[in-house]
Every structure is written in structure tokens, then in C-alpha cells.
Image (cartoon, grey):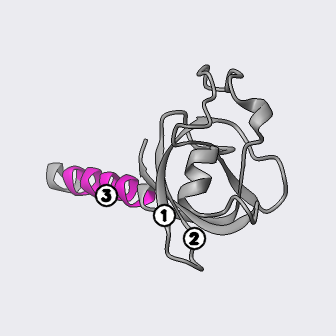
Amino acid sequence: MKKCLVCLLLFACSLGKSSLAMAERGYASFYHDKFHGRTTACGQRFDQSRLTAAHRRLPCGTRVRVTRPDTGQSVVVTINDRGPFVRGRVIDLSKSAARQLEMIRLGVVPVQVTVLDS
């Protein structure tokens, strides 16, 4: 009986870890300069020069890799706000993160968001 409980516990733990590797596809946009200096939903002052982002559901402090499938470029950001609130968009990036993905001119690009840790 104890062996069954240990096996069940190990199985449950492995499910939790595999969910961390889940990826979400959609579109990314980036913050307008008017939000620089405002307080985020996570209680931090928003700074366009930091590698941060907004996501609707991921906990504050979660680190994610945002990858552009069309170019292979990626950036690691920390979730510190809520949003985006536009259909089809999965993440809003700081301008610094958007620059690393070379998406400033385009404004919105397709991305894959992969959770690294929370």
C-alpha cells in the first residue's frame, strides 16, 4: 500500500513539472510609452527598459521565454502585470523585450510563450 502511495505521489509531482513546460501560441504586442512609470497589477513601477511582460493568468514573478516562430528570436521576461485584453494576444511586452524580438516596427507578431519557472 505504501509503495502505491509513493508511486501516486511521484506521478502527481511529475505532472506538475511537465505543466511548467507548457507553451501558449498567439500574438504579442508591446506597451505604449504612456505606461512607463505607472504601477503594474503586481505592484511594481513599470519600466520600459526592463525585460517584463503582462499575461492574463500567469502568476506575478513567473519567468517565460517568448519566441517568434518566424525568426527564431527569443527573449526571457518576467510577468509583472495583467493583460493583454485584446482577442488573440497572449502577452504584452516591455519595449526593451520587444526590441530584442525586433518587433517595434511591426507592433504585433506571432509568438510562443513557454513557462520557465513560477
Q: Residue 32's spot in the image, x, y percent?
A: 77, 41
Instruction: Please say whether residue 6 is one of the residues in the magenta stretch.
Output: yes
Q: Secondary structure at mark 3?
A: helix
Q: Nearer the viewer, residue 117 or 93?
A: 93
Instruction: Identify the residue at image location x=69%, y=44%.
Output: 56
Pointer 2 with pointer 1, Cβ within 8 A: yes
Write down the residue under mark 1: 74
Instruction: Please say whether residue 94 is one of the residues in the magenta stretch.
Output: no
Instruction: Identify the residue at image location x=60%, y=80%.
Output: 70
Write down the residue under mark 2: 68
Pointer 1 with pointer 3, Cβ within 8 A: no
Instruction: Identify the residue at image location x=73%, y=43%.
Output: 31
Q: Secondary structure at mark 1?
A: strand
Q: Nearer the viewer, residue 38 or 86?
A: 38
Q: Is residue 80 depicted above or below 22 in this figure?
A: above
Q: CA distance from mark 2 to mark 3?
A: 28 Å
Magenta segment range?
5-19
Q: Is residue 76 depicted above or below 41 in this figure?
A: below
Pointer 2 with pointer 3, Cβ within 8 A: no
Q: Residue 103's spot in the image, x, y percent?
A: 66, 63
Q: Earlier in the sequence, mark 2 or mark 3?
A: 3
Write down the residue under mark 3: 14
Between circles 2 and 3, the one closer to the viewer is: 2
Q: Nearer the viewer, residue 58 or 98?
A: 98
Q: CA distance from mark 1 to mark 3?
A: 27 Å
Specify the quadrant of the image occupied by residue 20.
Answer: bottom left
Q: Is residue 46 depicted above or below 112 in this figure?
A: above
Q: Earlier in the sequence, mark 2 or mark 1?
A: 2
Between circles 1 and 3, the one closer to the viewer is: 1
Instruction: Identify the residue at image location x=54%, y=33%.
Output: 60
Quarter of the image where the C terminus is located: top left
